[in-house]
Amino acid sequence: MQTRLPQLDAIRGVAILLVIFHNQGTKYPSLHLGTLFANGWMGVDLFFVLSGFLITGILLDTKHSENYFKNFYVRRCLRIWPLYYSVILFMFVIVPFLRPSEAQAHALFERSSPWWSYLLFLQNFLVSNPTGAAASLGVTWSLAIEEQFYIVWPWVVRYCSATQLRRIAVGVMCLSPALRLSVSVYGVDLYSNTFCRLDGLMAGALLALLVRSEGFAPPKFLRPAGIVLAIALPLALLLDAVNMKWIVF
């Protein structure tokens, strides 16, 4: 069974700080956070990798249990839904009641329309600018991706072998960049689109499969992991810089 890993809490903390400093860069220009953490958006990708790793680990460890689907979905619902729907209730019912001015209510629903998409975890597809939705609703697009991932991935894990799962994960990771490139010409919001985030989730899933493979020994992977990081990080920063130049010009 998957045990709690303190190291993952540290990684999660780093991801949180990256996103916070990145988002606060424009509010405190004197601190130069925007320059120092211009690539802090990568913290979101790190979240999806962690999610893919943890969720796939849970599914693999309980794959042959009798109440596999029931246990997974009940636990996910109890973990997420109470707080999530409390926020939805607060934003769409209590806030308009407390601030009933027509301008404020109009702004809330205009930025977060259609409001009912939040009930179905479809805001990342149906809201025109999900990251710019009113107040706390602006961060729920990532939760919508997680929920959509939960609908499909448990079934794939249940009925596919470890070899098939590895092939699926690698295949999705390789095809995702091509998918983002192909749909970008149609004005698709790549940042909040589930299909454009699958490589992060599958990278985590692949890691979960790796650590559960026979003969897995962490020391063997320290050097390859360091080499991959040394290559991938500068490449990601370079591609981001090139992309920003294209945006400017």
Image (cartoon, rainbow, N blue to C red):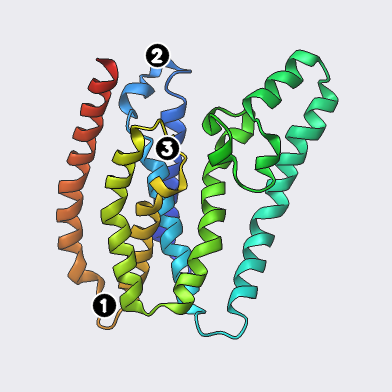
- The residue to which callout 3 is attached is 191
Q: Position of residue 21 (x, y in %)?
A: 43, 30
Q: Position of residue 4 (x, y in %)?
A: 48, 67
Give me the residue at 40% from left, 56% from top.
201
Residue 175 vertical placement versus 128 (above, below): below
Determine the secondary structure under disc 1. loop
Give me the residue at 55% from left, 27% from top.
132
Which of the 4 image quadrants contains residue 31? top left
Considering only order in the chain, which callout, 3 or 2, is on the residue closer to the N terminus?
A: 2
- The residue to which callout 1 is attached is 216
- Residue nearest the observer in this picture, 65 or 110: 110
Give me the residue at 44% from left, 18% from top.
26
Residue 3 vertical placement versus 169 (above, below): below
Residue 191 vertical placement versus 100 (above, below): below
Distance CA(mark 2)–CA(mark 3): 28 Å
Residue type of the residue flagged with mark 2? Ser
The C terminus: image quadrant = top left
Distance CA(mark 2)–CA(mark 1): 48 Å
Q: Position of residue 73 (x, y in %)?
A: 63, 67
Label 1 environment density (alpha carbons within 10 Å; few <14, some 14–19, many ≥20): few
2 or 1: mark nearer the eye: 1
Q: Is residue 2 visible?
A: no
Q: Position of residue 29 (x, y in %)?
A: 41, 15
Considering only order in the chain, which callout, 1 or 2, is on the residue closer to the N terminus?
A: 2
- The residue to which callout 2 is attached is 30
Question: In the rendering, which numbered label is found on residue 66?
Answer: none
Label 2 environment density (alpha carbons within 10 Å; few <14, some 14–19, many ≥20): few
Label 3 environment density (alpha carbons within 10 Å; few <14, some 14–19, many ≥20): some
| Marks 2,1: beta carbons within 8 A | no
